[in-house]
Image (cartoon, grey):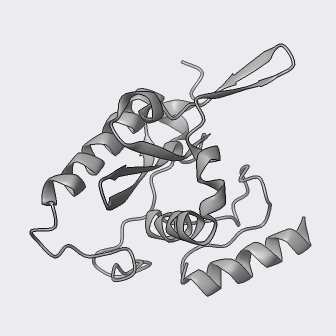
């Protein structure tokens, strides 16, 4: 685990992921493990461009393992035109998360949503971000993931909200 995490951190640094630190390979809770939406967008872009031979894995609707069918929780794959990946996640501390990608023509857009209250909300939020991106249609010059700054302090910094009371309470 330590060796794999060290490799993950080295790759994160290579990609310019300035606010990520990994301590395990599976993403399960650990207070020392942190990331940002910007860093996940950088990682997603690297996966899509550096390993194009694996793109089909990200858009699978489901896989069968014996008699068990494991469904993809990224509902955009089946419902959003051009959706081609990427990853869902959930832990109590950060809520429902989704890194989504979609392609229309020559344009591919990545949307990252952290801290939603449910699976449907994360999908709707990601779809809205993708729609806004495609609506720009190249007519403007939006910031790219490489020009965005990771904010870690100062006036623009807001500490992440602990989602536990909202998504994992026993009430």
The residue furthest left is 139
> Which of the 4 image quadrants contains residue 14?
bottom right
Q: Quadrant of the C terminus?
A: top right
Residue 48 location, x and y as percent? 54, 63
In depth, the one of 106 and 162 nearer the eye is 106
In depth, the one of 81 and 113 nearer the eye is 81
Residue 100 location, x and y as percent? 45, 48
> Which of the 4 image quadrants contains residue 6?
bottom right
Residue 101 location, x and y as percent? 43, 51
* Count of numbered labels shown in the rendering: 0
Q: Quadrant of the N terminus?
A: bottom right
Residue 21 location, x and y as percent? 67, 73
124 over 148 or under it: above or below: above
The residue sitting at 68% across, 64% down in the picture is 33
The residue sitting at 64% across, 45% down in the picture is 57
Q: Is residue 165 left or right of residue 113?
A: right
């Amino acid at each position: 685990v330590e060796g794999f995490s060290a490799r993950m951190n080295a790759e994160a640094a290579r990609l310019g992921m300035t606010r990520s630190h990994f301590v395990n390979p599976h993403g399960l809770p650990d207070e020392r493990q942190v990331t940002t939406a910007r860093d996940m967008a950088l990682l997603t872009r690297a996966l899509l461009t550096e390993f194009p031979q694996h793109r089909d894995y990200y858009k699978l609707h489901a896989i069968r393992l014996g008699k068990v069918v494991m469904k993809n929780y990224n509902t955009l794959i089946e419902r959003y035109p051009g959706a081609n990946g990427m990853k869902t996640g959930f832990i109590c501390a950060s809520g429902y998360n989704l890194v989504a990608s979609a392609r229309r023509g020559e344009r591919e857009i990545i949307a990252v949503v952290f801290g939603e209250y449910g699976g449907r909300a994360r999908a709707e939020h990601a779809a809205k971000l993708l729609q806004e991106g495609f609506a720009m249609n190249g007519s403007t010059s939006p910031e790219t993931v490489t020009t965005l700054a990771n904010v870690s302090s100062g006036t623009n910094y807001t500490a992440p909200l602990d989602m536990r009371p909202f998504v994992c309470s026993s009430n």
